[in-house]
């Protein structure tokens, strides 16, 4: 699998989890009245999107290079800065998942989560599965981000090698790869902004 496909696949996965997370938020907030449970639930919901924001922030200088002229003047600096910082970015998502998990543990002790109301019962079952697979035990959200960070670094190093031989070919590879990456990062950014409303 090409690096750009791997990056796009993981960005698409992050987008899908963000959509699911929004759905879980929407059902509870439109069904339950204001309460301590709902306040804590929304704190949990607000904790996780930081994972997505870190990915968007790390890719922003790279996705902003959208013309040959920018590639010629900005690529080297953007690549070097990314190489120096991507491991710092990669360490951040776990903080957000741990915060969401701590809130979830507190929620799981409250009687509200043990409801027999079918819509909420289904939502809380989905929340349990989401937390188990994507946030805590397997932490696939963290792993998806990690793949994006590390694969992007490898892709950039490939482009550096091509650029030493032929700038035009390097630009073609960059443009082809980062068109899809930029589109998916843009959607993820919109997802982050939706959480902030």
Image: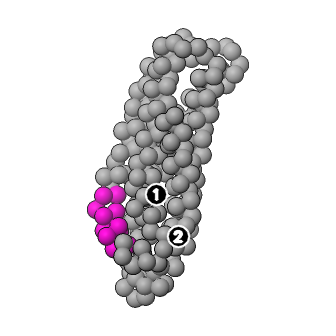
Q: Residue at x 30, y 64 (%)?
A: 81
Q: How crowded is mark 1: few (under 14 residues within 10 Å), some or many (20 or more)?
A: many
Residue 20: percent from left, percent from top = 60, 38
Q: Which residue is drawn at 64% across and 19% down?
A: 31
How far apart, in angstroms, are the residues tagged by discs 1 and 2?
Answer: 13 Å
Of badges 1 and 2, the one in the foreground is 2
Residue 128: percent from left, percent from top = 56, 29
Q: Which residue is drawn at 56% across and 17% down?
A: 113
Element assignment for label 1:
helix
Extreme front residue here?
Answer: 69
Image colouring: one colour
Q: Nearer the viewer, residue 157 or 46?
A: 46
Q: Give the range drawn in magenta.
A: 75-86
Q: Residues within 10 Å of mark 2 (few under 14, many from 20)?
A: some
The answer to whether residue 54 is left or right of residue 35 is left
**SS assignment for the magenta stretch, majority:** helix
Q: Of the numbered discs in the image, which one, if any, rests on residue 148?
A: 1
Residue 147: percent from left, percent from top = 46, 56
Q: What count of labels does the image hold?
A: 2
Residue 76: percent from left, percent from top = 33, 74
- Residue with the mark numbered 2: 177
User: Is residue 13 at least partly visible in the picture?
Assistant: yes
Considering only order in the chain, which callout, 2 or 1, is on the residue closer to the N terminus?
1
Element assignment for label 2:
helix
The quadrant where residue 151 appears: bottom left
Q: Residue at x 39, y 32 (%)?
A: 99
The quadrant where residue 82 appears: bottom left
Extreme left residue here?
Answer: 84
User: Is residue 158 at least partly visible in the picture?
Assistant: no
């Amino acid at each position: 699998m090409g690096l750009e496909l791997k990056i796009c696949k993981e960005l698409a996965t992050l987008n899908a989890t963000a959509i699911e997370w929004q759905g879980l938020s929407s059902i509870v907030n439109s069904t339950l009245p204001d309460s301590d449970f709902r306040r804590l639930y929304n704190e949990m919901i607000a904790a996780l999107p930081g994972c997505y924001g870190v990915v968007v922030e790390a890719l922003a200088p790279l996705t902003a290079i959208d013309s040959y002229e920018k590639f010629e003047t900005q690529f080297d600096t953007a690549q070097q800065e990314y190489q120096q910082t991507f491991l710092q970015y990669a360490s951040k998502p776990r903080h957000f998942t741990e915060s969401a998990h701590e809130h979830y543990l507190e929620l799981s002790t409250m009687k509200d989560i043990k409801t027999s109301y079918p819509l909420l019962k289904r939502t809380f079952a989905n929340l349990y599965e989401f937390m188990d697979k994507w946030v805590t035990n397997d932490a696939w959200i963290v792993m998806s981000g990690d793949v994006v960070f590390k694969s992007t670094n490898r892709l950039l190093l490939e482009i550096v090698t091509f650029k030493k031989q032929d700038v035009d070919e390097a630009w073609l590879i960059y443009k082809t790869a980062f068109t899809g990456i930029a589109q998916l990062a843009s959607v993820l950014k919109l997802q982050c902004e939706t959480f902030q409303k």
